[in-house]
Image (cartoon, rainbow, N blue to C red):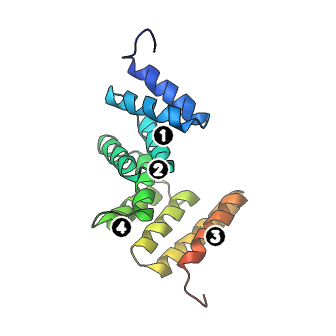
């Protein structure tokens, strides 16, 4: 990079490596620069959006995911992460509907075998006000995670799902 700062792939690789090492403050500028230089890689956009969310930069994370998903319309990871962001932090009219549509598409694309996708669907259902469906979907996600041997995830999903249950359920 010091010899040729215009090498987009080098910026992307540096940003991804730094993100993997947990060095968010150094990774974000490299990933941003790589995208500005024309890197069109869903993984780079996903990584940048995730780091931006961690930093509380929800608007830029959303814009990053939306732009990447417009270019990579079949990328399940981008759709999943945008659905989750919109379900957890809706900021515009229609966000919960978009989150629900994307989450359903991700569940369908994964054949209903991804507990994280089901967990996101539950969050989108809850954001849309359908707490009964959210509780049922969350319970299904937790059972699936447990059946796949991911007991930590099952516990996390169960904890989130408890917010969807009405008193006495």
Upstream in the sequence, badge 4 or badge 3?
A: 4
At a point 39% along the width and 16% down the height, the residue shown is: 5
Upstream in the sequence, badge 2 or badge 3?
A: 2
Upstream in the sequence, badge 4 or badge 1?
A: 1
At a point 39% along the width and 60% down the height, the residue shown is: 86
Q: Are marks 4 and 3 in contact (CB under 8 Å)?
A: no
Foreground residue among 1 and 85: 1
Upstream in the sequence, badge 2 or badge 4?
A: 2
* Residue at the spot of label 1: 47
* Residue at the spot of label 2: 53
Foreground residue among 8 and 25: 25
Q: Where is the C terminus found, in terms of image quarters?
A: bottom right
Looking at the image, residue 65 sits to the left or right of residue 53; the answer is: left
Residue 13: in sight, yes or no?
yes
* Residue at the spot of label 4: 96
Q: Are marks 4 and 1 in contact (CB under 8 Å)?
A: no
Upstream in the sequence, badge 2 or badge 1?
A: 1
Among the 4 quarters of the image, the one containing residue 19: top right
Q: CA distance from mark 2 to mark 4?
A: 18 Å
Residue 114: in sight, yes or no?
no
Looking at the image, residue 101 sits to the left or right of residue 43; the answer is: left
Q: Where is the N terminus found, in terms of image quarters?
A: top left
Q: Which element carries disc 1, helix, strand or loop?
A: helix
Foreground residue among 131 and 56: 56
Q: Is residue 93 above or below residue 54?
A: below
Foreground residue among 145 and 108: 145
Q: CA distance from mark 3 to mark 1?
A: 26 Å
Q: Position of residue 39 (x, y in %)?
A: 36, 28
At a point 33% along the width and 47% down the height, the residue shown is: 63
Q: CA distance from mark 4 to mark 1?
A: 23 Å
């Amino acid at each position: 990079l010091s010899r040729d700062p215009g090498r987009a792939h080098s910026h992307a690789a540096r940003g991804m490596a730094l993100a993997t090492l947990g060095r968010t403050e150094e990774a974000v500028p490299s990933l941003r620069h790589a995208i500005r230089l024309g890197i069109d890689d869903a993984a780079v956009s996903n990584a940048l959006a995730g780091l931006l969310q961690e930093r509380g930069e929800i608007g830029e994370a959303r814009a990053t995911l939306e732009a990447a998903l417009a270019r990579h319309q079949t990328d399940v990871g981008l759709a999943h992460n945008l659905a989750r962001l919109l379900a957890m932090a809706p900021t515009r009219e229609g966000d919960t509907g978009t989150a629900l549509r994307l989450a359903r598409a991700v569940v369908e694309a994964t054949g209903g075998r991804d507990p994280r996708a089901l967990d996101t669907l539950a969050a989108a259902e809850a954001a849309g006000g359908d707490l009964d469906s959210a509780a049922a979907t969350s319970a299904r996600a937790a059972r699936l995670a447990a059946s796949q041997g991911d007991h930590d995830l099952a516990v996390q999903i169960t904890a989130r799902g408890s917010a969807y249950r009405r008193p006495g359920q």
